[in-house]
Structures are given as C-alpha cells and as structure tokens.
Image: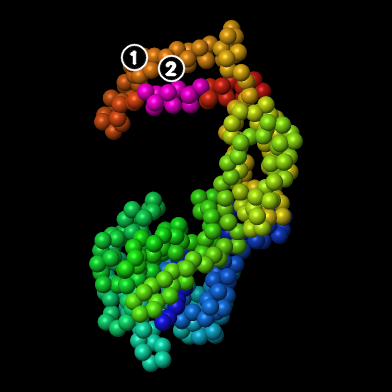
Amino acid sequence: MFRFIHAADLHLGNSGPSTSGFSKQWADLIYKATTTAFSNLIDKAIELNVDFVILAGDVLDTANPNLNSQLDLFAGLNKLSRAGIQVFMAGGNHDPLDLKKAQTTLPEGVHLFGERAETIPFVKGGVTLAEITGISFPVAKVSDDLSRQLVPGTKGFQIAVLHSNVKGAGKKENYAPSKLEYLTQSGFDYWALGHVHTRAVLSEKPHVVYPGTTQGTHVNETGEKGCYLVEVENDSVSLQFIPTSAYTWEKLELEAPKTLNELTELLEGLDELASGAKKVYRLKLTGMTPLYETLITDLKDLEERFKEGKHYVLESVELDILPDVDLEEVKLEESLPGEFLREAERLMALGVSSELKEQLAPLYDRLGGILDDLDEEEVKSIINGSIALGIELFWRGESR
Ligand SMILES: [Mn+2]
C-alpha cells in the first residue's frame, strides 16, 4: 500500500482580488492565500506521512515569479524533503520550463520533469511500487497533445503527470489538448492532471483526475478548493478530498430587503452565513423593493459600511433590483412609462404571430440558420426582460 497527494494549479504568487479598503488582517489573509494553501498542503502531507507528492503544473503563477513566491516554493519543498517525502513536479502554461529560474538546485527527493518525457520509479522497502512518468511545458503555449509522448513503464502502479486540457473538461484556452479516450487506453493507471481549476474525476479504472486549484483566486472559483489524497492498495485506488484554502469564494444571491430593518438584518447576518469559515462574498440583491432609490444612490456607502465582518469580506455588491411600483396603476397613466407598458402588453398579446417576428426577421436572416425560430415562451421571456429593463431605466432616470 502507498499513498500520495495529487495537487495542481497552486499559482504561488497570485495575490487574489484587490484588497483596497480591507483591514490589514483581511488584506494579509487574501494576499498570502496561495502560500497558506501550499503550506496547508505540506502540513497535511507530513501529518499523513504520505509517500510522495505530485504537483501537476502551474505551481507558480507566472513565468517571472517574484522573489517571495520562489522562496515560499523552496521553503515548502525543503520541508517535504526533510520529512523524507518525495515530490514530482511538472511545469504548466503559467510556469513553463523556459522561466528564468533562480540559480539553485532542487532539494533532495524533489524531481522536476523536463521537456522530454521521463519515468522515475517509486521504491519502498526495495520494491518498485510505482513508476511516475511526466513531462513539462517547454514554453507557455503548447498546442501539441503532450499525452502522446508519455509511455508507461513496466513495474508497479503507473502514474502519468501532465498539465493538459482534456477536451470538454473545461472552457479554458486550449493548452496542450488531450483526449479522454486516449488517456484511458494509454496503459496508465492514474493520470495526475493539472490545468482545470475545478476538481473532477473524469474516469475511474484507470483514474483520470483534476484536483483543481488549491486556492480560489477569483469569483469564478467558488467553493472549497484543495487536493486529493490517493491511496493505492493492490489494484484498488481510493480518493479523498483534502481542503487547503485560506478562504473560499461565494456568490450570494439574496432577495433585496424591503425595509431598513431588513437591510440591517441581512447584512449583519452575513457573518453567521459564513458559519465559521473565511468567505469572500460577491453579493447580488434581486427583485422589487421600495428601497430601490436608496440602494442605487447609496451603494458605495453600503459597500463601505459592511465591507467586512469577522468571517467575511464583500468583494462587491451588485444590484439587480426594480422599483416597487404597481405596474397596473402605471399602465393607466398618461405618461411615458405608462405608454411603454401598454405597448409591451400589446406585443405580448400578439405573441410570435406577426409584428415581433417581422421586426426580428432581419436579425434572423443575418444569423442564417444559427438560431431556431422563437417559440411563444421565448418571445414572452424576451418581452418580460425588456419590460424589466425599461422600468428600471425609467425609474433610475427619475431618481437622478
Ligand atoms: Mn492553472
């Protein structure tokens, strides 16, 4: 039996979102988060006494890393080395081999794969339990399928280490694309991948795994991030997720408060919502509210006043709100909004049948065949969206 940690996309040196306006405590926590996550990973590896650690690319955030991130990396590698834990590292699109590396040698037991594939045995008690084959990005932009260059060895459990975009696994730029069908038929037992920042097990037997990033650094990287602890016993492989993040991102969408009391309650409740964890929120308020004008006009004050709590900070507050007006009443008014609503209602009654379709015809002609014809529901949803936008513009204009 042996155990290893599979991590990738540590992006050491990435300082996360802007921390302007945050307290020093929060600013430090966010600024140092990628390093904290790395250090959490190392502590876990030592505590669990794993046999080795795999870092599958984008260990550093840039090809020209700052001194601090390089020192952090070497401090971590040294710690693992002293604990007798081997490290197998590959370079990715953010930290390719052509980076201007500090003049230094890697600590004992740390292996960085080169631009040609190589296979290194993992030996325990005189027995080769596994072989680890890997390759690094020679330059930042690789359009070749590097997986084709990796050939499994002959002894023990076969692991491949690669930074690669498996087709269909992520929406990111197509760096070093590879195909899942090829990976699963290549003879390897475990593909230790990096590149996609959301963890995913693409296949079992053989395993094709993205551990995701160890620390979310922007709003699209929500939720707990970390690495996988992999245990191999005979031919059975088990994975356990280990969280490493210093804080997590969360998109909060809440119904806009209707009164000042509700507003206070909502914002004071943010700390409780974090339930003890450190959260960076992007807050979105939605729906109709009598506080429409207040919220729109004084958004900056609101953001500043509730910028942070004990367990959370607000990255930003987004308003997707509407004034709380009685549309039926407005419809009867001899006013521009009244006329607008009456026109919208008229269109709604027409449905797909005539006018709207006529008006949209040039657009459809131009897109020729890309879009299907609109059905009744889609037309209704377009008109409803337009009504909401129109009302919002009328009332926003009024409040200025
Ligand atoms: Mn990455």
Name the residue furthest bottom: 126
- Count neighbours of disc 1 (C-alpha within 10 A) and say few if under 14, some if 14 to 19, many if 20 or more: few
Q: Mark 1 points at which residue?
A: 354
Q: Residue at x 53, y 22 (%)?
A: 390
Provide residue 189's location: percent of width, then percent of height: 32, 72
Judging from the image, what secondary structure is the residue with disc 1 in? loop
Splitting the image into 4 quarters, where does residue 134 fall? bottom left
The quadrant of the image that shows the C terminus is top right
What's the CA distance linking mark 1 and mark 2? 11 Å
Judge whether 315 appears above or below 137 on screen: above
- The residue sitting at 32% across, 21% down in the picture is 362
Determine the secondary structure under disc 2.
helix
Q: In this view, does 248 lie above or below 344?
A: below
Q: Does the residue labelled 2 lie within 8 Å of ligand 1?
A: no
- Magenta: main secondary structure equals helix
| Kind of residue sitting beneath label 2 | Met
Residue at 55% over, 74% down = 44
